[in-house]
Image (spheres, rainbow, N blue to C red):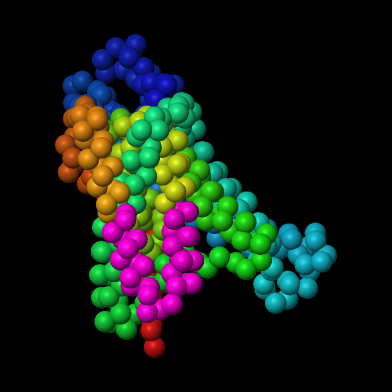
């Protein structure tokens, strides 16, 4: 817990405060009665509770993300007569679809994780730190993340090649920009602006900061793995993981979620821009353009990295974790919790369903 102690220290040894008693925090010892668990066991219980709570929030998100779009589409066809004829065909105009996506994404992601944050009593200012970071860190962070994503894309290409050799294909998560102007604006909001705020609030805000009590490095790693898994795509996973690690690190080092929002916004914006650029470039020049973009990302990322190393000596160091459990024990406790196992099974199935045959 953050702002409240769930167990009272005012009772005598062996006695239990009935109003604050949690059986998971006590063990029975013959001759002594119920005594508190050792500190390392309490820490393990706390981590497992956090893992299960995060898992439940993810499952709640998946349920809402499945049900809300259909429900909202049904409401549109009922209360807006001009769209009623779409009900029989099962398709709504793209502009309506983008509007539904906007509202259902906010509700589906926001509600479960807001409940999670409230349940652990984490202060809002701690979960979502919004002080303005220094521009001298934000700009290099953007280029470092772009450069790192280019390196990670090699793994994505390898996975795609392996699938191709097996006669399989996995589509990415970037769609073509709609032709109609209003629809394209809504698409950009849903693909660039909304994730930059909403996903940062959840993954680099609530999840990351709720786990920092178990160590900054652990919180950065776990929040990034969950962020990558949430894409439900084996091709996107390596890039999302690396970008998540970069953004999480800079959010921790700058103590500001604005860093993550700005970097995420720039990354998503460049992804949309490059997707449109590649579709407009003749096929014979596509490899050349891709090579130039890759070289530019790597050069700017390397220059930014050197700049931060030379100007900020302690930029790439984290405080050691003040925990009783070591790293492997924390990872084992977290990933073998029931809620997290369920989440990875579900997202694993989603990733498999996203793979289709080339023939």
On the question of residue 10 being in view, the answer is yes
Q: Quadrant of residue 246?
A: top left
Residue drawn at (43%, 69%) of the image: 278
Residue drawn at (51%, 52%) of the image: 192
- Residue 233: give x, y in percent of width and height: 38, 64
On the question of residue 208 being in view, the answer is no
Does residue 292 show up magenta in the picture? Answer: yes
Instruction: Point out the residue furthest to the bottom here.
Output: 359
Work out whether residue 241 or residue 326 is closer to the camera in this orientation and state it.
Answer: 241
- Residue 140: give x, y in percent of width and height: 33, 40
Position of the C terminus by quadrant: bottom left
Work out whether residue 250 or residue 352 is closer to the camera in this orientation and state it.
Answer: 250
Work out whether residue 276 or residue 248 is closer to the camera in this orientation and state it.
Answer: 276
Q: Is residue 260 left or right of residue 48?
A: right
Position of the N terminus by quadrant: top left
- Residue 314: give x, y in percent of width and height: 21, 29
Q: Is residue 75 left or right of residue 112?
A: right
Residue drawn at (28%, 59%) of the image: 295
Q: Is residue 178 left or right of residue 260?
A: right
- Residue 10: give x, y in percent of width and height: 34, 11
Residue drawn at (50%, 49%) of the image: 195
Q: Chief secondary structure of the magenta span?
A: helix
Q: How many labels does the image show?
A: 0
Vertical position of residue 354 compared to residue 39: above or below:
below
Q: In this view, does 299 lie to the left or right of 70?
A: left
Does residue 290 show up magenta in the picture? Answer: yes
Q: In which quarter of the image is residue 179?
A: bottom right
Q: Give the range drawn in magenta.
A: 268-297
């Amino acid at each position: 817990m953050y702002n409240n102690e769930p167990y009272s220290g005012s009772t005598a040894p062996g006695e239990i405060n009935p109003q604050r008693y949690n059986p998971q925090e006590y063990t029975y010892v013959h001759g002594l009665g119920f005594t508190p668990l050792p500190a390392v066991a309490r820490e393990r219980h706390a981590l497992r509770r956090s893992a299960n709570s995060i898992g439940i929030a993810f499952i709640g998100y998946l349920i809402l993300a499945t049900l809300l779009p259909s429900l909202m589409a049904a409401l549109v066809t009922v209360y807006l007569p001009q769209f009623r004829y779409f009900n029989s065909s099962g398709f709504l105009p793209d502009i309506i679809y983008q509007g539904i996506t906007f509202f259902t994404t906010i509700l589906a992601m926001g509600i479960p994780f807001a409940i999670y944050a409230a349940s652990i009593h984490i202060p809002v200012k701690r979960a979502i730190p919004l002080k303005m970071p220094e521009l001298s860190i934000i700009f290099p962070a953007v280029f470092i993340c772009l450069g790192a994503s280019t390196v990670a894309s090699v793994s994505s290409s390898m996975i795609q090649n392996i699938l191709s050799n097996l006669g399989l294909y996995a589509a990415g998560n970037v769609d073509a920009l709609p032709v109609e102007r209003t629809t394209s604006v809504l698409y950009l909001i849903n693909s660039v602006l909304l994730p930059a705020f909403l996903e940062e609030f959840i993954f680099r805000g609530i999840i990351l900061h709720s786990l920092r009590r178990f160590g900054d490095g652990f919180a950065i790693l776990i929040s990034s793995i969950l962020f990558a898994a949430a894409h439900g795509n084996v091709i996107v996973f390596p890039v999302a993981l690396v970008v998540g690690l970069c953004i999480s690190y800079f959010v921790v080092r700058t103590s500001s979620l604005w860093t993550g929002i700005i970097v995420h916004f720039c990354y998503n914006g460049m992804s949309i821009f490059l997707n449109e650029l590649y579709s407009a470039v003749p096929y014979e020049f596509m490899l050349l353009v891709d090579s130039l973009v890759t070289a530019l990302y790597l050069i700017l990322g390397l220059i930014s990295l050197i700049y931060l190393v030379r100007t900020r000596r302690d930029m790439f160091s984290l405080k050691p974790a003040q925990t009783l459990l070591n790293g492997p024990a924390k990872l084992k406790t977290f990933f073998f919790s029931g809620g997290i196992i369920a989440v990875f099974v579900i997202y694993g199935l989603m990733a498999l369903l996203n793979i289709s045959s080339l023939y």
